[in-house]
Image (cartoon, coloured by chain):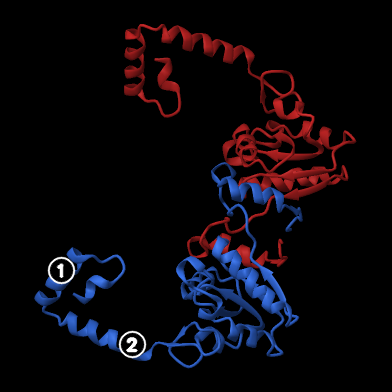
Chain colours: A blue, B red
Amino acid sequence: MALSGLPGIGKKTALRLAVHLTQDKNQKALKIAQALIRLHEDIKTCTLCHNISDEDTCEVCRMSSRKRSLICVVENVRDVMAIEDTNQYRGLYHVLGGVISPLEGVGPADLNIDTLVERATNGETEEIIMAISPTIEGETTIYYVSKLLQTTGVKVSVIARGISFGGDLEYADEVTLGRSIMARLPYQNET
Amino acid sequence: MALSGLPGIGKKTALRLAVHLTQDKNQKALKIAQALIRLHEDIKTCTLCHNISDEDTCEVCRMSSRKRSLICVVENVRDVMAIEDTNQYRGLYHVLGGVISPLEGVGPADLNIDTLVERATNGETEEIIMAISPTIEGETTIYYVSKLLQTTGVKVSVIARGISFGGDLEYADEVTLGRSIMARLPYQNET
């Protein structure tokens, strides 16, 4: 059954869904099918940043209010959504499509790195922010990409890593706590 | 029953413990009582840093290998333990004994701030690291204490705050994610 291939849906749930759809009077099955066909046909990938889009370039890339000199490099489309939800960032994005992971057979060639280097040298880019999760694979990817970007002369920065805001020191994991102390910063009154 | 006043121990558990102790053949009750008396009599507070101690000054303050020019300010004794567990920090501590919280009636006078200012001006202190949880009360405390310390000329720093190491960007809370991007740092190859 095709439904059971979806994440979080096993054989039993798939069967329950299928039975529900066969007994439904409102043509729900047909509506879902049409929506899925539209999804399949209409959703494209932004030619600039590889974000999902309904046109050639995505909504963020089309916005005139965005700072075009700033590119935030993320792992996937969900990260773009998470960062957009914060309402803090006003630049553009670049979706890598994953992180370098030899164990899972993902190498640099499988990621959207060429297009990032191209964008870095397009004359309008001033800063590239690496907003990649601070895992081992993430750090490897940050290292690899920033090495490549070094030659372009663009400023490369990383998001702050440490104790979460609102979090309790006592419950932080040892690595984060240890590194937060080592990576301490001069205190600046933010007022 | 005295036992039920302990955290995590309710009436029923207290009763079960009490019954267990009355039926025990190994004088467990007596041993616990003696241990508690020793605890009551022997555990002192370090006169220097307010950490728990068995002598006038605590184990950390007595260690000759510690960098005496560096003081890490924490909220409570559990934070000292958490930081010691990381095996990263080689300086001294200062236990505030809480954070400023008007809602809970905790003001600056209730905390060990006077002794911190004293230590800051003792001639050997060069840097004071504020390792306080980044909550609203914590930030208020950091602000208050660092204002006081400004006059002493000692360098005041804060632990790094941001996305946890090993953590996934996607699951970070909005505030942390937003601030981590705003508080980004120039990338430095750590190799």
User: Can residue A133 be seen from the camera position used here?
Assistant: no
For disc 1, the chain is A
- In this picture, is B130 found above or below A7? above
Of residues A29 and A128, the one nearer the viewer is: A128
Q: Which residue is mark 1?
A: A15
Numbered-mark total:
2
Point out which mark residue A40 bears.
2
Residue at the right extreme, as displayed: B123
Of residues A119 and B149, the one nearer the viewer is: A119
Q: On the rendered structure, is A133 left or right of A118?
A: left
Q: On the rendered structure, is B155 left or right of B13?
A: right
> To which quarter of the image does residue A12 belong?
bottom left
- In this picture, is B147 found above or below A97? above
Helix, strand or loop status at disc 2: helix
Within-10-Å neighbours for mark 1: few <14, some 14–19, many 20+: some
Residue at horizontal 9%, vertical 75%? A23
Amino acid type, callout 1: Leu
- In this picture, is A155 found above or below B151? below
**x and y, in percent, of residue B83 in the image:** 64, 40
Of residues A22 and B113, the one nearer the viewer is: A22
Residue at horizontal 71%, vertical 39%? B73
**x and y, in percent, of residue B32 in the image:** 47, 12
Distance, label 2 to label 1, CA atoms, is 24 Å
Point out which mark residue B190 bears.
none
Residue at the bottom extreme, as displayed: A56
- In this picture, is B3 found above or below A137? above
**x and y, in percent, of residue A106 in the image:** 49, 73
For disc 2, the chain is A
Which quadrant, please, contains the C terminus of chain A? bottom right
Helix, strand or loop status at disc 1: helix
